[in-house]
Image (cartoon, grey):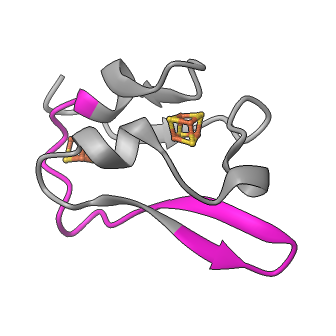
Amino acid sequence: MLDRLPWVDTTRCDVAERCADCKAARFCPNGAFGVVEAEGGCRVSIDLERCKRCGECAHACELGAVRMI
Ligand code: SF4
Ligand code: SF4
């Protein structure tokens, strides 16, 4: 798992409408996974400087939008 990075399938992620309650962000132990406001709605953002490639975000996302690739 350590050589892989989280990747978000935006067609599955529904954060654009909700702008909150992202489980992947909540369970990221390193504060790397977050929700940011952007033009046209919210989106998730991953800070690769902070990301330790642990895969917790992929486990936490109920919609299967986050994958380690
Ligand atoms: S938990 Fe998954 S589907 Fe839900 S907002 Fe976060 S990344 Fe998107
Ligand atoms: S792989 Fe781990 S550190 Fe990186 S964003 Fe996901 S939960 Fe956070």
Residue name at image x 19 percent, y 40 percent: 53
Q: Quadrant of residue 65?
A: top right
Residue extending furthest toward the right: 40
Asked if residue 60 lies in the magenta stretch, the reply is: no
* Left or right of residue 38: residue 34: left
Residue 20 vs 37, above or below: the answer is above
Q: Is residue 59 left or right of residue 30?
A: right
Q: Quadrant of ligand 2?
A: top left
> Going 46% across and 26% down the picture, which residue do you hit?
61
Q: Quadrant of residue 40?
A: bottom right
Q: Position of residue 10 (x, y in %)?
A: 72, 42
Q: Residue at x 17, y 65 (%)?
A: 50
Q: Residue at the location (12% across, 55% down)?
A: 30
The stretch of residues the image draws in magenta is 36-56
Q: Position of residue 2 (x, y in %)?
A: 13, 31
In-image side of 69 versus 41 (left or right): left
- How many badges with numbers are in the image? 0
Question: Is residue 45 shown in magenta?
Answer: yes
In the displayed structure image, the side of residue 19 where residue 46 appears, left or right? left
